Image: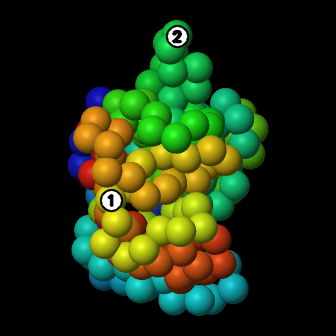
Amino acid sequence: MAYGNQVKTDALSTTYTSEQYPLGTVFVQQADEVTAAEHTDATALGLKGDRTWIFVKAAVALVIYDCAIVNAADTATSSFEVRPSDAAGDNPLDVVGVAQNAIALNAYGWVVCSGECVVNGAASIAAGNLIDTHTGGQVDDSTVVGTLIGKALSATNTPVTGTIRARLRIP
């Protein structure tokens, strides 16, 4: 797996119909770019710090802010073909990242795998809660050791309806 920055001129929100970078390529986004991140309606997302992205293929379409896991995790032959999380407490080793934009079925794009991001969240998450996966591409609050993927930095519906700000630490 490549690590670090390569020459890349496309926005991280760009999606592709073919594999423009090797699956699993890692890109580190600098803090000044992260701070400037906005939702599609220009809502400031309030993110801080560097974050790391990984290049994936959507085996199932991802909507904006979906938590993405390895497709067919039990029998996966590719660690970088993903689908939305579909269960509470998925194995964190099967969690690949969080889409910051939609990625169509069989399209390629970037997901955040480390650092601050926005993710679809269940209804009762409070700032400071630890989080794990949930159904429908969401995350939820949890204290179950062995399933945790990060920490909520905001309550549900902040910064955008149905989402939370989170800091990810995916293994």
Q: CA distance from mark 2 to mark 1?
A: 28 Å
Is residue 59 left or right of 166 when viewed as pictured?
right
Is residue 35 left or right of 73 when viewed as pictured?
left
Question: How many neighbours does mark 2 have within 10 angstroms: few (below 14), some (14-19), or many (20 or more)?
Answer: few
**Res. 11 in view:** no
The residue located at (47%, 77%) in the rendering is 155
For residue 46, which numbered disc appears in the image?
Answer: none
Q: Which residue is mark 2?
A: 75
The residue located at (37%, 76%) in the rendering is 127
Q: Nearer the viewer, mark 2 or mark 1?
A: 1
The extreme bottom residue here reads 43
Which comes sooner in the sequence, label 2 or label 1? 2
Q: Is residue 135 above or below residue 8?
A: above
Q: Secondary structure at mark 2?
A: loop
Q: The disc labelled 2 sits on which kind of residue? A: Thr
168 or 30: nearer the viewer: 168
Quadrant where the N terminus sits is top left
The residue located at (44%, 25%) in the rendering is 79
Residue 67 in the image, given as x and y percentages of width and height: 53, 49
Q: The disc labelled 1 sits on which kind of residue? A: Leu
Q: Is residue 81 above or below residue 38?
A: above
Q: Is residue 11 above or below residue 144?
A: below
The residue located at (33%, 59%) in the rendering is 130
Quadrant where the C terminus sits is top left
Residue 159 in the image, given as x and y percentages of width and height: 53, 82
Q: Which residue is mark 1?
A: 130
